[in-house]
Image: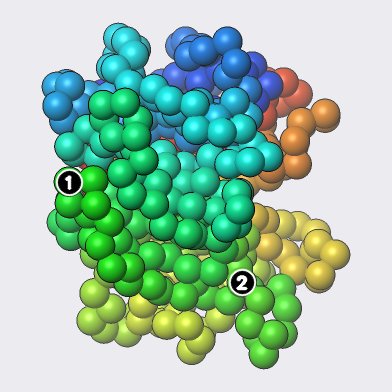
Amino acid sequence: MDADAAGTPVAAVNEATRSIEFYPAPTPGHPWKPTSRWRPVSSWAGGVDVKLRPGGPYGGRVLAIADGGSGYVGIYSYPGRVRKWSAYVGKARTTNVHGVEFLPDGNVAIANAAGPDGGRIKILARKGAKVLAWRTFPGAHEVLYDPSLHALWAIGNDRLTKFPYRAGRLGTAVNYKLPRSSAYPPSKNIPSYGHDVQPVYGHRDRLWILTSGGVTQFSKTATKPCKVVATAVKWPLPGLDGVGRRYCNDFPGAAGINAGNPRPDRTGSYRRLPKSIGNDPSTGRVLLTYPNPAPGAHAWTTPYATLYGAPGWQPTPFSPNRTKTAYYRVRWLVSAYQ
């Protein structure tokens, strides 16, 4: 982790510049401009995911990157950005890769949101990118390795799943239903559609969970009841689908981080369909992205990385250019898995 007094630097995937951009730690009252832009390959369409990870067999640290438009997935040294491994896994119509994870043994996990099964989780070999294992996983959007459990987490349309992982093999899935959508009557049991799963740094029992409904945290052990802070999005719904024990909104700043849009959507819901989240282990601050597209940009993008932090946990938007920025995900450059 390249932290300084202001916190941890950041990487963002930006469709408007068709690049991965690197930023200093966001500081309220200071301009936020990229220190560098990087287009890994000429076909790069903007990117969907970027993570810093321990380098495993490569040593040092590596960046794991993925691009849905081109289907390119790669592992590069950091900060040198020398290619160590790459593969084209299929373009958006056929595969729509949405997430990537670098595993400690050098293999690579990907989350494909499209395909003949409606989505798949795959393990690709370090040598040759052969598919070592796969599972049907509708709407797969992200994967996360958990060293404490030797497992791979995956999030999709209606579930969060834990797969035991060892040497390229996926074990028996343990499924946890995502809290149902609050935009429809609970009796309809409409999925909330998962978008991101990330570690809660400083709390190894917790994972950040993003769905179209909003933001919550998942307790791996669910050993005791937890609080759910009510907000305009009315998600997650207390008492259903493990909410109040397995899914918790008792984290600092929950009321602001899980706030809603100022205007309701066509269903009457104030949900804002967040796309990425993470907390900085150096400062505790949280970065969130949710759609608010610049003119001409895709509906799932935003020109802002929104920062929340103590004492008031009020949102502070950061953008290098409000009309020519189209972020999907923004990540703290933290190499630790948890």
Which residue bears the numbered disc 1? 167
Mark yes or no: residue 32 visible. yes
Q: Which amino acid, by three-letter code, is at mark 2? A: Pro
Q: Nearer the viewer, mark 1 or mark 2?
A: 1
Q: How are the colours assigned in the image? A: rainbow
Q: Which amino acid, by three-letter code, is at mark 1? A: Ala
Residue drawn where x is 68% and y is 40% of the image: 93
Residue drawn where x is 24% and y is 52% of the image: 169
Left or right: 186 in relation to 229: right
| Residue 17: x %, y % from top left | 64, 16
Q: Earlier in the sequence, mark 1 or mark 2?
A: 1
| Residue 120: x %, y % from top left | 49, 52
Residue drawn where x is 25% and y is 62% of the image: 171
Name the residue nearer the viewer: 63 or 1. 63
Helix, strand or loop status at disc 2: loop
Name the residue nearer the viewer: 233 or 65. 65
Q: CA distance from mark 1 to mark 2?
A: 33 Å
Q: Is residue 253 above or below residue 250?
A: above
Question: Which image quarter holds the N terminus?
Answer: top left
- Local packing at callout 2 (Cα closer than 10 Å; few below 14, some 14-19, many 20+) is many
Which residue bears the numbered disc 2? 191
